[in-house]
Amino acid sequence: MGPAHAPEDLMVYVPSEKVLFAGDLVFRERIQFVGNADSKGLLIALDEIEKLNPSFVIPGHGNYSIKPAEDIAFTRD
């Protein structure tokens, strides 16, 4: 997915469970450090994550998300 948060961003999606391991592409309850980020790439990555419509997201930081749409929007905002 990179470059986005970092040049080597990686995520893993388990379609049968609708679980996304998002790494630092999605944060929960905290503001992302974007000092080394590619902001345009991050927005594109978030769009791609939304298309997956995961039921659960395991973010790079914070607890797992049972409301991925809200946490993706928070990260984008």
Image (cartoon, helix red, strand yellow):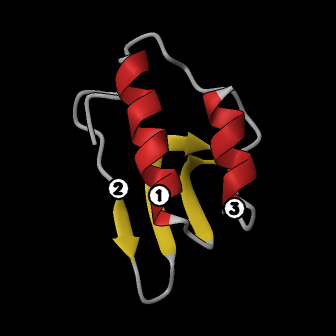
Q: Which mark is residue 51?
A: 1
Report the amino acid beneath label 3: Ser
Q: Position of residue 71 (x, y in %)?
A: 70, 47
Mark found first going from the N terminus, 2 or 1:
2
Mark 2 → mark 1, Cα distance in angstroms: 14 Å
Q: Is residue 5 visible?
A: no
Answer with left or right where residue 43 lies relative to residue 59: left
Residue at 51% from the left image edge and 78% from the top image edge: 18
Mark found first going from the N terminus, 3 or 1:
1
Q: Which mark is residue 5?
A: none
> Circle 2 sits in a helix, a strand or a loop, which is it?
loop
Answer with left or right where residue 10 lies relative to residue 54: left
Label 1 crowding class (10 Å Cα cut-off): few <14, some 14-19, many 20+?
few
> Circle 3 sits in a helix, a strand or a loop, which is it?
loop
- Name the residue that disc number 3 marks: 65
Label 2 crowding class (10 Å Cα cut-off): few <14, some 14-19, many 20+?
some
